[in-house]
Amino acid sequence: MSVKAAMTDYFERLLDYWNEKYNTFPKAPWDEDINPLLYLSEPDEEEYIFWKPVEKKDVENFSAIENEIRMPLHYSIKDYFNSYLFLSLEGLYHSNYIYLEPVEPDKDLLSYFKNLKNYEESQGKEFRYVQIGFISPDEMAINVDNETGKIYIEDYETNELKLLARSLEELIGEIKLKK
């Protein structure tokens, strides 16, 4: 299964869940700085909007990004950022509640990857692990090993890595929606 196929399955399950449980689309916090392409409503009184994922048509050319950060990116990372535009990809993976990086319209991926690289290097680490989300409430990073595609949890305090999933496809494919 590809990353895109795993994401397609996840978003189908997400839309079905919201439709069956609430007879509506998913909700997310409204952000006036985000291109409203995914928004299906005006913000409600609690500043939430209905939204829907959209298959990404204008895919990112990662050559410029890879040249700028001086490193090729694992295919799964590129597939993740080139498959869909979405505001939320979250749920339970085994006993962890995970949040993966949203891919909003007009997201500046060059800045995203440059910031990750600059942070890792400022910590004296090589830029090998690409943060793609975090675990709540522990606030630990979810990283893709750029060499192998394996997914690790990074403890910020100890800098220890613990294997979470064999691939991004496995991680996304096995996320359970909150019930």
Image (tube, grey):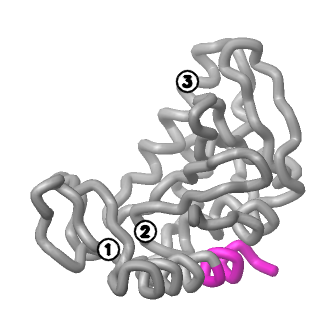
Which dot, 3 or 2, sits closer to the camera? 2
Q: Residue at (65%, 82%) from the top-left corner?
A: 9
Cα–Cα gap, marks 3 and 2: 25 Å
| Amino acid on which disc 2 is placed | Phe
| 3 falls in the magenta region | yes
Which residues are drawn in magenta?
1-9
Image quadrant holding the N terminus, namely bottom right
Question: Do the numbered discs 1 and 3 sit on residues whose CB atoms are within 8 Å?
Answer: no
**Marks 1/3: CA–CA distance:** 31 Å
**x and y percent of residue 127 in the render?**
70, 32
Which residue was labeled with disc 3?
A: 119
N-terminal of the pair, mark 3 or mark 2, is: 2
Residue 68 inside the magenta-drawn segment: no
**For the point 62% across and 76% down, which residue is it?**
10
Location of mark 2 (residue): 86
Q: Specify the quadrant that holds the C terminus.
A: bottom right
Question: Residue 57, position in %: x, y?
Answer: 44, 84
The image quadrant that residue 162 belongs to is: top right
Amino acid type, residue under disc 1 in the picture: Trp
- Tell me the element at label 3: helix
Q: Residue at x 45, y 53 (%)?
A: 109
Pointer 1: what residue? 51
Give the x, y percent position of residue 107.
Answer: 37, 57
Which sits in the foreground, 124 or 161? 161
